[in-house]
Amino acid sequence: MRRTNQLAAAAAALMLVVAMGFGRFAFTGLYPLMVADGQISLDGGAYAASANYAGYLIGALLAAVWTAISSRKLCALATATTLVMLGLLAVAMPEWLIIAVRGVAGAASAVAMVAASHWLIHDRGHHHGAPTLFAGVGLGILVSAEIIAAGHGAALSSRAIWLTVAMAASVIGVIAVAMQCRIDRIKPQVEPAVRRLREERPPPFGPTRLVVIYGLAGFGYIITATYLPLFVRSAMASVDPVHVWAIFGLGGAPSCFIWHALHQRWGTRHSLMVNLALQAIGVALPVLHSSAAYVGSALLVGGTFMGTVTIVMPAARRMAATTRFNMLAILTAAYGVGQIIGPLIASALFSRTQSFDASLVAAAVALIIAAGFCFGTARPVRPVR
């Protein structure tokens, strides 16, 4: 059974490699190349990013209402949709259609995030598989970024690189879906209630506060996650910005295990506060406009943003009995709202100042506020009957 749980965690992680690491974040690495090749304009890329974040919000809401569909089937649907959207970006199409494709890809990534989490943690009962699951996002960013860098080094066009990314994602996606199907033939092992209650600490605060914290975290990281390669391209001409984006992913994958361990040792309140405070420092670093600051930002934000998810999602699962709604989906939706607001504010401030400094400071302040919300006395909560 232990081996089955490990395979289940690996399968769920591969789902996020495809839907999040490739389907969602490969665009960040390819954005500068798409602009250089004339595949999309600078403004069009901003609209495409906003459409992706809006799609992420819609996907989270859809996952909340699609309760009649099994989590495994939702994972397969999200994976297939992601692969189609990646392939379409290899085809010549008008800018408005690229924006629409990115919107659908965003919805698929949210459905995959909610469904893969629900399948592993709830359906399979593998409560300690969260770090492996969420490490899939950082691993996907790293692998897709290096594929993009290799394509750029080989002088491939942005469309040819999209095709390469889609082909690689297809191989991983087929493996992930096949693994899930095989694993679901084995009945999950339910942990004894006494052991489960001993290992799980009560929620440190109520669902509303956790939703607010997570929404602020979505706003806090997204400007760095959207524009970091553009920052690097303008300041470090001798360095391929995709490699710095790969550092972002390199920090994300192992960080999930570190933050999971800290979560178990310190509890939700303190581990989340430290996580958000470090993330705030990483978000603010590019204001210094130095090479070291950009690399440090990639490591710090990359090393904390999925750590936030690794801490919050298991805490949300413990709150499930106190709510009448799908807590994972509502949290994902709140994160999506924060991600939509972030680029809008960044765009508005950039039009006035011709700089992203003010928006980065605003994002860092949002993360500090979120860290502050981790403290305070929680009202006692009762299970919903």
Image (spheres, rainbow, N blue to C red):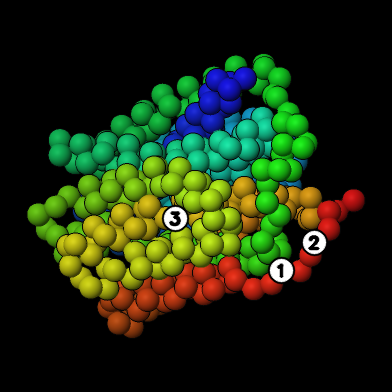
Give the answer, above or below, for where 267 lies relative to 14: below
Q: Which residue is mark 2?
A: 381
Image-quadrant location for residue 63: top right
Image-quadrant location for residue 68: top right
Q: In x, y percent, where is residue 315?
A: 64, 52
**Mark 2–mark 1 CB contact (< 8 Å):** yes
Q: Left of 150 or right of it: where is 323?
A: right
Measured Cα–Cα span from mark 3 to mark 2: 28 Å
Image-quadrant location for residue 126: top right
Which is nearer the N-term, disc 3 or disc 2? 3
Decide which of 75, 274 is in the foreground and name it.
274
Q: Which residue is mark 3?
A: 305
Which is nearer the N-term, disc 1 or disc 3? 3
Q: In x, y percent, where is residue 103?
A: 50, 51
In the image, which disc is placed on residue 378? 1
Residue at the farthest right position: 385
Measured Cα–Cα span from mark 2 to mark 1: 9 Å
Q: Quadrant of the N terminus?
A: top right
The crowd level at tag 2 (other Cα within 10 Å; few <14, some 14-19, many 20+) is some
Residue sitting at 45 percent across and 38 percent down? 136
The crowd level at tag 1 (other Cα within 10 Å; few <14, some 14-19, many 20+) is few
Count of marks, rendered view: 3
In the image, which disc is placed on residue 276? none
